[in-house]
Structure formats: structure tokens, C-alpha cells
Image: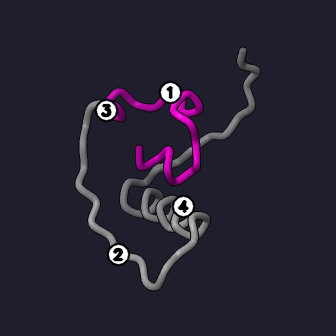
Amino acid sequence: MIIRNAYQLQEFQLVGGPGWLGADRFDIVAKADGNPTRDDFSAMLRALLADRFKLVVHKETRDLP
């Protein structure tokens, strides 16, 4: 859910990943200064995931029905 929020994805748009992605759970405690916009919040989440979890993503375009 955090990854989908960070990249503003629908559930069907997140494909693949390691096996633990759907099984392991983490508590993330973070606080944003001020009142960030949705785009600002997403950017902060992406930075947090990259920094704390070493998340690396690959974007691609797929044809879907």
C-alpha cells in the first residue's frame, strides 16, 4: 500500500517484487513539516522508501485489456 501511494498506482499497476513484499509488515513512523500537497507527500514517501528500505523501482508500459 505504501509503494502504491508513493507512486500513485492502482493495485493492478504494481507487478512483481520479492516474495516478502506481500507478506512482511513494517511500522513506519514519519512526520512531514507543514501541509504537503499530494505530490509532495508522494515524493517524500519515495525518498523514504529509497533511503530506509533501499527500494529500487523499474517502470514500464504494458498493454492491458
Q: Gap in Å between the C-alphas at discs 1 and 2?
A: 29 Å
Tag nearer the camera, 4 or 3:
4
Residue tagged by mark 4?
A: 42
Residue identifier under label 2: 31
Question: In the rendered structure, which amino acid carries the disc numbered 1?
Answer: Gly
Position of 29 with respect to 57 (left or right) is: left
Which callout, 4 or 1, points at the residue further toward the start of the chain? 1
Instruction: Please provide percent x and percent y for residue 16.
Output: 50, 27
- Mark 3 vs 1: CB contact within 8 A: no
Quarter holding the C terminus is top right
Is 41 situated above or below 65? below
Q: Which residue is mark 1?
A: 16
Q: Amino acid at mark 2?
A: Lys
Residue 33: x percent and y percent?
Answer: 43, 84
Quadrant the N terminus occupies:
top left
Q: Residue furthest top?
A: 65
What residue is pinned by disc 3? 20
**How many angstroms separate mark 2 from mark 4 (CA)?**
13 Å
Please state which amino acid type lies under the numbered disc 3.
Trp
Residues rendered magenta in the picture: 1-22
Q: What crowding class fits label 4: few (fewer than 14 Cα within 10 Å), some (14-19), or many (20 or more)?
A: some
Q: What residue is rendered at 47% in x and 61% in y? A: 45
Q: Secondary structure at mark 3?
A: helix
Which numbered mark, 1 or 2, is in the foreground of this view?
A: 2
Q: Nearer the viewer, mark 2 or mark 3?
A: 2
| Distance from the alpha carbon under mark 4 to that under mark 1 | 21 Å
On the rendered structure, is 60 left or right of 7?
Answer: right
Residue 45 is marked as: none
The total of numbered circles placed on residues is 4
Give the mark toward the camera: 4 or 1: 4
